[in-house]
Image (cartoon, helix red, strand yellow):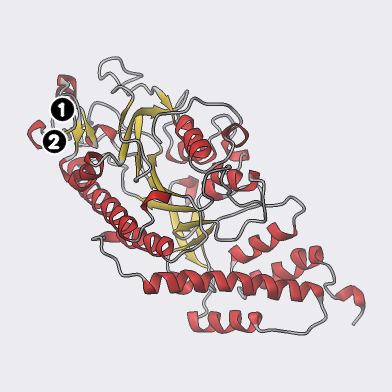
């Protein structure tokens, strides 16, 4: 065989060898991306703190997918227009967990209200962005990239933040998403966060999400027909020490070994963890894994969670009531375990949804896509309270709440004051900071 047939450079290896191995599913897809980041001349950097700020600070992002109805979450029970606009979907005033004489929390957010009462929750009202988009996918792109004008051509804001840091090469687990696919927010120009749903399959099993017709739906599609045992054996074979004399194959072996070590660390941390908090449902399982990884001492600085089901066009009350209970119970459980394990002072949790919903309910007892939503921050580091005034229920934008706080101000505050980055560099603009930390 001629020398030309050997993979003798990293670039050839990455273009040919790793692509073939990925196609045969010997190597999981996230490993190929990690290898590409190592090869690329643009250094991929980890998050680092500013002088005097510990490097070990953590951000947990919780995405409420579908468009959470903020008026049924933070309820304007003291405003008559709320009840005149909603006969079925409205939360009765006598059940609201009152925060002041105008607004209160949904009755199923009792556990979350205890966090607020302890001063560890910030409620940011009337959050949005100029000329809001009411499409789920387009609006979510805006939130994930923090770029309103060209979100499809932009890196994710957290991926960009990781790449724009100034020291070292990013570990593959700097950012972890619990799910089948890393969200756009964690994808930079070269860096991609790790994503997994089942930690037992993290090292050797991959899945991809396939967009349905016209982008209406997403369905999970298995990438292979091999059993987990077969995949584990293939991956283990790859990781065996070799004396090949081939720099490209040695490079692959080294990269795979390092990546497998991190996945083993993840699985061990989750297996060891003994929760105190009471977790429920799918979000509970995911939040418990995050608590376990933090308690286990992983180097991960960003965790990404999601809770879906908020597209409540019909029969909103029952479904939204259940979602509020799942949200509240699991946020409280996570905060409880962070406190118990001594990590609460270094963890900030932020939740958002792609948009709010219209003020008036529809004929099906639900609410349609709107604007002017809200964001929440949780944790011991939070400056608790209510930020901003509640939007008017009469001065509307085509039937929707008017936004007052640009969500990128929240991002800028988190980047500059918590993660030690430079928000102007990441967001491309300067935004005013908020009193939330």
Q: Please tell me which residue is depicted at 59% across the width and 43% down the height of the picture.
A: 161
Judging depth in this view, the residue of 239 and 11 nearest the camera is: 239
Circle 2 sits on which residue? 96
In this rendering, is residue 304 above or below 371? below
The numbered mark at residue 32 is none
Examine the image and state in which quarter residue 89 appears. Answer: top left
* Residue 207 visible to the viewer: yes
Examine the image and state in which quarter residue 244 appears. Answer: bottom right
Q: Label 1 to label 2, Cα distance in Å?
A: 7 Å
The numbered mark at residue 77 is 1
Q: Position of residue 2 (x, y in %)?
A: 92, 79
Badge 1 crowding class, 10 Å Cα cut-off, few under 14, some 14 to 19, many 20 or more, is many
Tell whether label 2 touches label 1 (CB within 8 Å): yes
In this rendering, is residue 420 above or below 224? above
Q: Position of residue 273 (x, y in %)?
A: 35, 70
Q: Secondary structure at mark 2?
A: loop
Q: Quadrant of the N terminus?
A: bottom right
Q: Position of residue 284 (x, y in %)?
A: 30, 59
Q: Position of residue 151 (x, y in %)?
A: 57, 36
Examine the image and state in which quarter residue 391 appears. Answer: top left
Q: Extreme left residue here?
A: 94
Question: Quick check: 417 left or right of 326?
Answer: right
Q: Secondary structure at mark 1?
A: loop
Badge 2 crowding class, 10 Å Cα cut-off, few under 14, some 14 to 19, many 20 or more, is many
Q: Please tell me which residue is depicted at 31% across the width and 36% down the height of the picture.
A: 384
């Amino acid at each position: 065989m001629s020398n030309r047939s050997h993979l003798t450079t990293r670039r050839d290896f990455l273009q040919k060898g790793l692509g073939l191995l990925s196609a045969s599913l010997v190597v999981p897809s996230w490993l190929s991306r990690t290898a590409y980041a190592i090869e690329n001349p643009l250094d991929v950097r980890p998050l680092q703190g500013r002088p005097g700020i510990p490097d070990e600070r953590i951000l947990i992002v919780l995405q409420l997918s579908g468009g959470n109805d903020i008026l049924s979450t933070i309820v304007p029970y003291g405003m008559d227009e709320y009840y005149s606009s909603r006969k079925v979907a409205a939360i009765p005033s006598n059940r609201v967990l009152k925060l002041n004489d105008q607004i209160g929390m949904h009755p199923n957010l009792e556990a979350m209200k205890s966090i607020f009462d302890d001063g560890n929750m910030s409620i940011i009202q009337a959050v949005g962005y100029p000329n809001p988009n009411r499409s789920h996918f387009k609006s979510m792109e805006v939130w994930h990239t923090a770029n309103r004008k060209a979100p499809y051509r932009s890196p994710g804001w957290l991926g960009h933040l990781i790449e724009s840091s100034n020291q070292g090469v990013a570990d593959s687990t700097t950012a972890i998403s619990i799910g089948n696919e890393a969200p756009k927010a964690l994808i930079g120009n070269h860096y991609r966060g790790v994503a997994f749903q089942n930690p037992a399959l993290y090292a050797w099993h991959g899945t991809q999400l396939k967009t349905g017709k016209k982008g209406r739906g997403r369905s999970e599609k298995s990438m292979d027909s091999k059993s987990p045992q077969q995949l584990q054996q293939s991956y283990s074979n790859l990781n065996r020490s070799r004396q090949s004399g081939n720099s490209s194959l040695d490079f692959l072996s080294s990269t795979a070994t390092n990546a497998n070590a991190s996945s083993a660390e993840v699985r061990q941390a989750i297996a060891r963890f003994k929760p105190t908090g009471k977790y429920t449902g799918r979000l509970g399982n995911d939040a418990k894994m995050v608590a376990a990884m933090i308690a286990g001492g992983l180097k991960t600085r960003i965790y990404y969670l999601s809770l879906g089901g908020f597209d409540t066009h019909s029969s909103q009350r029952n479904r939204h009531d259940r979602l509020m209970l799942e949200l509240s119970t699991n946020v409280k459980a996570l905060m409880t375990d962070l406190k118990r394990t001594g990590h609460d002072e270094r963890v900030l949790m932020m939740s958002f949804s792609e948009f709010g919903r219209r003020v008036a309910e529809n004929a099906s007892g639900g609410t349609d896509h709107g604007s002017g939503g809200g964001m929440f921050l949780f944790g011991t580091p939070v400056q608790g309270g209510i930020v901003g005034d509640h939007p008017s229920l009469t001065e509307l934008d085509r039937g929707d709440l008017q936004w007052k706080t640009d969500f990128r101000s929240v991002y800028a505050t988190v980047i500059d004051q918590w993660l030690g980055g430079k928000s102007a560099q990441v967001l491309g603009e300067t935004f005013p900071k908020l009193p939330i930390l």
